[in-house]
Image: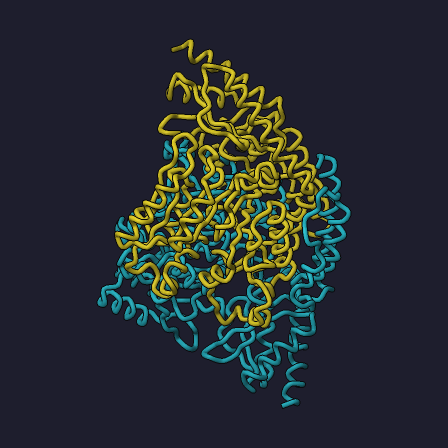
Chain colours: A cyan, B yellow
């Protein structure tokens, strides 16, 4: 592809993306085709000769769009948002064009240093504890997801708990254990499995049934029981904003207990961390000074496209010691000087993209004020929706909703609530998902797509109320 | 950012990328600034208000470019290439704009199905064994890197070797071991460490000193010794195209030995796998029908930007069984039907981008013929360079060079060879790296950047020959 062809097709596709954003709200939020429909529209094998651009361009409209679940749709209320924005996409475009592979400082000085500075900027924006800054003993790094952050934190915790033996001898016969609440994310169990601890080494600590937050006394008892039984607690994962209901674990008390037992404390704020850009929501992060590591996903609720998980450690040397392996072909003067960060030692993959560009673009375009406005809009829309629910006595709110997720159900029970979800999703105008709270089936409405406005939340409520009337009438 | 602002800035940045590619050959391939220079050009904290686009645009030229190691530079001969291309960047642009998160089929039917089909297309293009196709028992998936592929293969191997106990009890007291040659990539040791096997559980099998390929007899002896000692071999990683010298392990013999011992065979062809698009280079893949998993990196030598590692398994159920964890909030009808692929169960992260778009764009734009031409160009340029080296009796070739990497040294020894590397890299026109072969210091020249032509290879040789004259004269 010549430079001129790239310019022409590039301008065309920039316009295609802009058109998509302008029209996405009028499309069904989910496709109705059965599995296999997209694959059936593709040829069975690759072309033997290049076939130009027109066919590809047409297939974006005819093959891809009809098979999309539209995460940027203003009626997308499922899971947690995975929002993006113009500046984020442009940062990704520049990063892809530069094509740098920043595994070492030497292979990408700008990629490395912009990442370090952007994570320091983010730490300032969220008012994270000083020791997470690169100018102190810690520092930040971009991971693909909070799953990988949980894995890396688990490995650092094992390295600390193993006292040097873990790197060389692995898990061996030691019964390492990992602790999170019953509401902790599935990635914590997955990280423990990957790290060789096994599912049976994961302790699910009970929560307060009203707040769904971890009970510190239960954590202390579980840690003490393991120690008494000869197991070796390695990591506690506390959550700010659980996936199920956005519960907030009490970090101050948990932190003091971790310190007492000498256990690595990782704080998973994948979704709700973004809220800390707003001073009035920083109560959720009280006690974070006890954490050894912390992560949140700008790609969920901070206008930065997937993938961009921001992960910090308080002691960068502990992380690097757990993960570094140095073959001859990667040796270089800068690394040996000790004066640089080689981000390959901060995560699983060796190779790395220039992902901090999109973060830089987003932070500069919106500024702190613009990001706060985005968060406040999401919180406000969710509270508006919760008020609708609370005012209708056929419904009940199922959990506290301090951020932009509201969990609710029909008082008539699980079957009616499940039918409600199916009926509203079948309209194609909205997409909600579900969870279980204290055993009961619960609908989740999560606000965060950049185009979602009051009208969309009101329409969703209207559709829910109408469907509830039908379902309750049908008995 | 409004749609119109996105169009305007997007067109401008597409042009910026095109200008970059047109001018990159005239820039120094590496920056001369010391560590910290890029960071020093950035403000200490984020802006409180958004500051528009002009400042960002200027900083790309004034902050980023002067700090770049230019992987797309025609004189970039370091490590392995990490090439990209116009169609790849455009595929990434569209993927970023769509902003879909394809963790489950249900959350991204098009993202999931295009990925499945593209991996089948690639399997056809490389003539991979039938059982790696999704239409058989296997299938492919995009991982970020060969490091993650090695980790996932290790986990599947542990699941098989543990006979069900690994998922629940982890490593426990079992002494699992992993085998690769002394030339295997450092990511294999890193994967073993992450998986809780520990560095001491990695067996580095000796190689033939002339070919640097694994000795099957040594592998058999190492496996038998472990079994006799009560250890449990879990994974053998064979390599097609080692990082140090592109040595090719004898897969047929290794495969039969793995079968005999019931051990998972993973084949790491991160760099050289791309060569299999050319029928005349498929000798390197002979015996692949014995493999349980295989990966190569289109982002290294197949015109697809980082990150895009293509990973296949022969038995997809073994992989999913090792990795799946199902919380309530991810349950959905499509998954429970068993009729779909949920790629979250094929790797570490839960969230996933629409990375198959760039692969689709590349395969359609170039076609099989265009990709073969790219590989053949790289091989031909490397052989041209090797002929220069072979014709100068001050130099010696240090290893076989069937692909696009040439390893060579000055016969005068390690100090002279190291001085040669430093001097040529100091010109700023080329960037080569080094390795050690049988203990000796060796320079590596790897061809693969799309703009590299005969003139660049000839100029590199000319600079090396001139520098050698100086160094040998200086004694």
Residue B246, given in percent of the width and then of the height, sits at 48, 35
**Horizontal side of residue A43 vs A374, given as left or right:** right
- Whole-percent x, y for residue B196 in the image: 34, 54
**Vertical placement of residue A240 versus B25, above or below:** below
* Front residue of A159 and A183: A159
Foreground residue, B374 or B347? Answer: B374
Q: In the rendered image, is residue B425 in sight?
A: yes
Residue A410 found in image quarter: bottom right
Tell me if residue B459 comes above or below residue A92 in the rendering. above
How many discs mark residues in the rendered view?
A: 0
Tell me the quarter of the image containing the N terminus of chain A. top right
Quadrant in which the C terminus of chain A is drawn:
bottom right
> Which residue: 65% across, 63% down?
A69
Q: Residue at x 33, y 65 (%)?
A: A253
Q: Is residue A429 left or right of residue B449?
A: right
Question: In this view of the protein, can residue A374 be seen by the observer?
Answer: no
B428 or B460, nearer to the observer: B460
- Name of the residue lying farthest toward the top: B473
Counting from the top left corner in percent of width and height, residue A174 is at 26, 59
The answer to whether B323 is drawn above or below residue A467 in the figure is above
- As drawn, B472 above or below B385: above
Residue B461 location, quadrant: top right
Q: Nearer the viewer, residue A439 or B91?
A: B91
* Residue A183 at x, y percent in the picture: 43, 69
Q: Is A93 positioned to the left or the right of A13 in the image? A: left
């Amino acid at each position: 592809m010549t430079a001129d062809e790239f310019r022409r097709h590039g301008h065309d596709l920039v316009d295609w993306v802009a058109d998509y954003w302008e029209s996405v709200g009028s499309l069904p939020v989910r496709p109705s085709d059965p599995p296999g429909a997209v694959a059936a529209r593709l040829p069975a094998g690759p072309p033997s000769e290049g076939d130009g651009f027109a066919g590809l361009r047409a297939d974006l409209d005819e093959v891809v769009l009809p098979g999309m679940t539209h995460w940027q749709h203003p009626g997308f209320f499922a899971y947690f948002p995975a929002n993006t924005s113009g500046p984020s996409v442009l940062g990704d475009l520049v990063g892809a064009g530069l094509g740098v592979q920043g595994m070492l400082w030497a292979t990408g000085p700008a990629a490395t240093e912009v990442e370090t500075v952007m994570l320091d900027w983010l730490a300032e924006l969220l008012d994270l504890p000083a020791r997470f800054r690169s100018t102190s003993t810690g520092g930040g790094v971009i991971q693909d997801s909070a799953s990988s952050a949980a894995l890396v934190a688990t490995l650092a915790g094992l390295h600390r708990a193993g006292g040097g033996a873990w790197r060389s001898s692995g898990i061996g016969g030691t019964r390492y254990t990992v602790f999170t609440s019953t509401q902790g994310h599935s990635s914590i169990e997955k990280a423990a499995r990957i790290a060789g601890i096994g599912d049976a080494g994961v302790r699910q600590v009970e929560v307060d049934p009203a707040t769904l937050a971890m009970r510190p006394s239960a954590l202390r008892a579980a840690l003490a029981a393991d120690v008494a039984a000869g197991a070796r607690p390695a990591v506690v994962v506390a959550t700010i904003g659980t996936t199920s209901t956005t519960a907030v674990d009490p970090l101050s008390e948990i932190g003091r207990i971790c310190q007492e037992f000498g256990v690595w404390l990782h704080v998973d704020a994948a979704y709700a961390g973004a809220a800390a850009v707003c001073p009035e929501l920083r109560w959720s992060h009280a006690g974070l000074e006890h954490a050894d590591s912390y992560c949140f996903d700008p790609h969920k609720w901070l206008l930065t496209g997937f993938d961009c998980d921001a992960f910090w450690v308080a002691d960068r040397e502990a992380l690097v010691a757990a993960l570094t392996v140095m073959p001859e072909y990667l040796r270089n003067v800068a690394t040996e000087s000790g004066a640089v960060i080689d981000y390959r030692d901060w995560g699983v993959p060796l190779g790395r993209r220039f992902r901090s560009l999109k973060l830089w673009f987003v932070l500069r375009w919106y500024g702190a004020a613009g990001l706060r406005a985005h968060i406040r809009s999401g919180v406000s829309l969710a509270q508006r929706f919760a008020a609708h629910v609370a005012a209708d006595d056929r419904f009940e709110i199922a959990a506290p909703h301090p951020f932009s997720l509201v969990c609710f159900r029909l008082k008539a029970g699980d079957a009616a609530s499940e039918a409600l979800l199916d009926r509203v999703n079948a309209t194609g105008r909205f997409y909600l998902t579900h969870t279980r709270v204290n055993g009961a089936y619960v609908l989740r409405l999560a606000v965060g797509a950049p185009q979602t406005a009051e009208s969309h939340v009101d329409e969703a409520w209207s559709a829910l109320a109408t469907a509830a009337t039908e379902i309750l009438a049908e008995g």
